[in-house]
Amino acid sequence: MMAEPAAALGIPLRLLAEAQGVSAAQVIPDHAVGDYRSLDALRSVTNGCPVVTFDHEHVPTEHLHALEADGVAVRPGPEALVHAQDKGVMRARLAELGVPCPRNAIVTSTADVEAFGFPCVLKTTRGGYDGKGVWFARSAADCDEAFAAAAGTGVRILAEELVDFRRELSALVARSPSGQAASYPVVASTQKDGICHEVIAPAPDLAPELAGQAQEIALRVAGALDVTGVLAVELFETTDGRILVNELAMRPHNTGHWTQDGAVTSQFENHLRAVLDLPLGSPAPRARWTVMVNILGGPDATVGRLYDGYPHALARDPHLRVHLYGKELRPGRKVGHVNVYGDDLDDCLERARHAAAWFRGDLGNESE
């Protein structure tokens, strides 16, 4: 999704793709297939590139240090990115900064978890995403799977309190090497089965002081960690009216996909501008409300069935914006999203939800 603004700006991209035909390789001609865990592959693809950036956090930290030693401009740099790669490192640094977080501790045994207290959430410090590497523990028996998954990997387990939250929020900012920063409106996100389902921008009925606190936290973290590019700060709004930081992502983020159509400058364009140290674009919204709903592969996940959604969805709603990723379809996998914007939130929600359900196949037998 960075390819579109890159083309508009005349910025050539080179891609390290994990396999032939993956979605990014479909739109970036200059690509090589290789393993991001291989330093040789990384060196080969970054040779001659003035700037290197990422669409996930899983490139080994030591490889990023090696690229920097080679003279490659790595953005965000490894000293920043490690806070998105390792949740234990993140929690320790946020505590130093006085950023409000759930109570947490590194645990090495069930006895440690019992001492921490049930119920709690157990997370692998590295490698987890979209609900993977996360377990809810309400008794000692619930700890076995987490420790078994981490055994022999060198990955630690983090215990966090089970937060009583009203909803999940996300504060998205972009920051350039020269220190310029742009802050998008704070959004509300809904998760299902550990996967982002929908986003509402801005978060409805969010107290102005909490919105300001969320944006201040994101900007402060971006500056303190020397982040270059987009930083997404995932937050809990607790039932007693507090803001707690859940996780960090240093890349364009699912909770910012609404910006493709709902903001003056998308998160993808601002990420490119930031890592190239170009002036950032306006993050202002284009409409009062924007709703993003993810399209997931349905139970009968086939390419034909997915694209069969176009005639109905586009004819029903000419203002709808559809983004399909060209990914191999699997049930439950994020394969696209729809954006709807306007002045009536209920109308935007209905239109976006209907379109996403139609693409998924949930409404395929519904009469129009």
Image (spheres, helix red, strand yellow):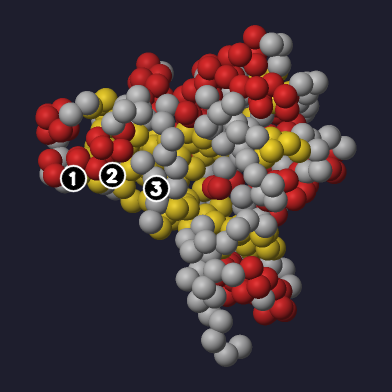
Disc 3 secondary structure class: loop
Is residue 10 visible to us here? yes
Q: Looking at the picture, how far across and down is residue 234, in whole percent?
A: 45, 40
Q: Is residue 337 above or below residue 35?
A: below
Foreground of the two, 174 or 285:
174
Quarter of the rendering containing residue 163: top left
Is residue 100 visible to us here? no
Contact between marks 1 and 2 (CB within 8 A): the answer is yes
Foreground of the two, 252 or 151:
151
Q: CA distance from mark 1 to mark 2?
A: 8 Å
Disc 2 secondary structure class: strand
Q: Is residue 252 above or below residue 290?
A: above
Residue located 69% across and 35% down the image: 16
Crowding at dot 1, Cα within 10 Å, few <14 / some 14-19 / many 20+, comes out as some
Which residue is label 2 attached to? Answer: 135
The three-letter code of the residue at mark 1 reads: Asp
Disc 1 secondary structure class: helix
Q: Looking at the picture, how far across and down is residue 355, in whole percent?
A: 60, 71
Contact between marks 3 and 1 (CB within 8 A): the answer is no
Which residue is label 3 attached to? Answer: 131
Crowding at dot 3, Cα within 10 Å, few <14 / some 14-19 / many 20+, comes out as some
Q: Earlier in the sequence, mark 3 or mark 1?
A: 3
Q: CA distance from mark 3 to mark 1?
A: 16 Å
Residue located 61% across and 22% down the image: 39
Residue located 61% across and 37% down the image: 55
Q: Is residue 96 left or right of residue 31?
A: left
Which residue is label 1 attached to? Answer: 142
Q: Residue furthest right?
A: 10
